[in-house]
Structure formats: C-alpha cells, structure tokens
Amino acid sequence: MSDEDLGLALFIRHFERTLLRLVAEGHVRGTTHTCLGQEYIPVALAPLIAPAFVFSNHRGHGHYLAQFGDGEGLLAEITGRDGAVCGGRGGSQHIYRPGFCSTGVQGENVPVALGAAVHSQRRRDGRVAVVYTGDGTWGQGVVYEALNIAQLLRAPLVVVVENNGIAQSTPTGRAMSGTIAARAAAFGVRFHRVDHACIATIRRELREPVERTRAGDGPLVVEFRTWRLGPHSKGDDTRPPAEVARVQRHDWTLAYRASHPEQFDRVDDTQRRRVDELAEAVLQRPRVDGER
Ligand SMILES: Cc1ncc(C[n+]2csc(CCOP(=O)(O)OP(=O)(O)O)c2C)c(N)n1
C-alpha cells in the first residue's frame, strides 16, 4: 500500500494505543473503545465513499481520523482539553463535525443515516450516507426497520458491518442466528463481504457497488470479517488468554510487516513519534472545564 495509506492506518494504531495508556494514567474520564485491529477499514473506505456523510458508533476513533486526520481535535475531545472538536462535551463516543456524527447508542445511527441519505437523494448532491455498525448491533430491531425503508426508497445508504466476532463479551455465534448476508437479502438489499485486509483490493471490490448505491440502485451492506485486538473498552477483556493470542495472530500489521519490512518500520516509526508528540502537546493544554 502507499506510504500515505499505511501512515494513516498506523497513525490510528498509535493513537489508540496511546489512548489506552492515557486511560491507565488517569487522563481520561468515562470510557473509551479502541479500534485496534480494525484500522484498515475506514482507511480503505474514506476515499471510496467521498462525498459522504459518515455516521459512526462507540468504536469510532478510526472512522473520524480516516475522514479528517484530526488527531489533535479528537484527543483534546477525549481528554477534555482546549481545541476539542466538540468542546469536550462529546468525549470518545459522541463526536459531531460537519459530515460526521457518532453515537454510543447501538443502532441509533442507522435510521439517522437513512434520513441523511434521503436528504441527499432529494437534493441530488451526490453524497452517500455511510453508517458503521458492529455485528452485535444487528441485534437491534431498528437496523431492520431502516434497511426495509432504505430499500423501498432506494436510498444512497451504505451500512458497514465491522464483524469482529464478539460484542463486548458475547461471541457473535451466541447472539446471531443466520448471517448478515441472509438478513440483507431478506430486504432485497445488495451485500458484499470482505474477509481480508488489503486496502487496494477492498477499494477495487467496493468501487462499483458503492457507486451503484450513489447512483440510485439502493442501499448496500458491506460486512468486514475483522478482529478486535484490544479489550472491549478500557481494560475489560473477558476473553481467555489463549483466545486473545489466537485473535492477535490475525493482526493485519503482522502480515504486512513480514512482506514490507523496510516500509513498515519506517512509517511506523514516523507515526509513533507523531502521536507521542501530539499527546504531549494536547496534555499541556488547559482543561475545558477549568480544572487542573
Ligand atoms: C442500545 C445499547 N445497548 C447496549 C449498549 C452497551 N454496549 C456498548 S458496545 C456493546 C457491544 C457492541 O458490539 P458490536 O456491535 O459487535 O460492536 P463492537 O463493540 O464489537 O465493535 C454494548 C452491548 C449500548 N451502547 N447501546
């Protein structure tokens, strides 16, 4: 992949790792969910979906960073410091910026994204609405109400499913009967599954389906088989160590580093230093609540 794509994916990786450290050191109030292991998904999608309105979820830092590259605004938001993208009121899970909106309430953003998609359809502004969901969120009925109407209206809506095989502590197989593909098919909604982490291939595979959605062929569900390398949120990994080790073997950086060692180490080093500097600078800023 290009230095630019790799750099963005590794920027997100270091951002999330640093965030877990800052949580452990007491710099973050409330909770936070990292997208360790899933970084390549929004990086692959960002140029493909533009122009888009992106709706994100509780695990949304990568979605935001891939759209805007704004690590400072996001870290300031999460740590409640000056320069926070939402004045420090949204925290990790509730980020708004024109063209982007996240929520910690599972499923909430699917009908909201549908509304934005219909708005774009009526204005003919060429935008797609893209909503990120986890596999566990497909247990929410509102997802199906939205899919039904989206298909009836042929709305320019792309529903992304980051299927990491687990919802908090529940393995997907214990909560989901059948498949996401069959659920999309039940509404006549087009479906595409991705079970690799090659950014160039993802873009090649999805270009036409996304453009069809933009052009009026109706919604699209894209399911990524991916891996949650870290805990559910701050430090609450309920998986046995052997399971965590098994999941870690799917870390996309392992395969990529093995095939491109020079590029990986060079870009990784740059992004690690960039995030270190960013964190140091943000933590020196005054708190938005006036406390020290
Ligand atoms: C309506 C609602 N119910 C419960 C929760 C608590 N909760 C937050 S994330 C989560 C699991 C989400 O799993 P999934 O959709 O698979 O996404 P993942 O965390 O794996 O990315 C739960 C139960 C919530 N945020 N919203």
Image (spheres, grey):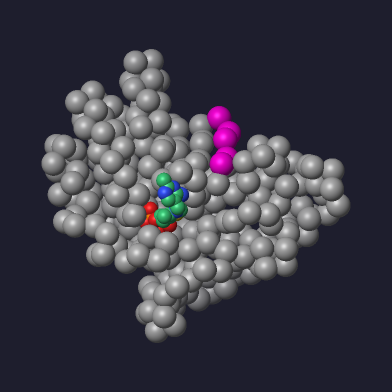
Q: Is residue 22 left or right of residue 42?
A: right
Q: Name the magenta segment's main secondary structure.
A: loop
Q: Is residue 92 above or below residue 196?
A: above
Front residue of 260 and 150: 150
Residue 163 screen position, x and y as percent: 33, 58
Q: Is residue 154 visible?
A: no
The residue positioned farthest toward the bottom in the image shown: 242
Front residue of 211 and 144: 144
| Magenta-drawn segment | 94-98
User: Residue 97 colored magenta?
Assistant: yes
Residue 227 screen position, x and y as percent: 39, 66
User: Residue 210 colored magenta?
Assistant: no
Residue at 35% from the left image edge and 49% from the top image edge:
137
Residue at 37% from the left image edge and 48% from the top image edge:
133
Q: Is residue 45 left or right of residue 153?
A: right
Q: Is residue 258 visible?
A: yes
Residue 86 screen position, x and y as percent: 66, 37
Front residue of 269 and 230: 230
Residue at 49% from the left image edge and 41% from the top image edge:
103
Residue 58 screen position, x and y as percent: 49, 49
Q: Is residue 218 left or right of residue 56?
A: left
Residue at 67% from the left image edge and 45% from the top image edge:
77
**Which image quarter holds the N terminus?**
bottom left
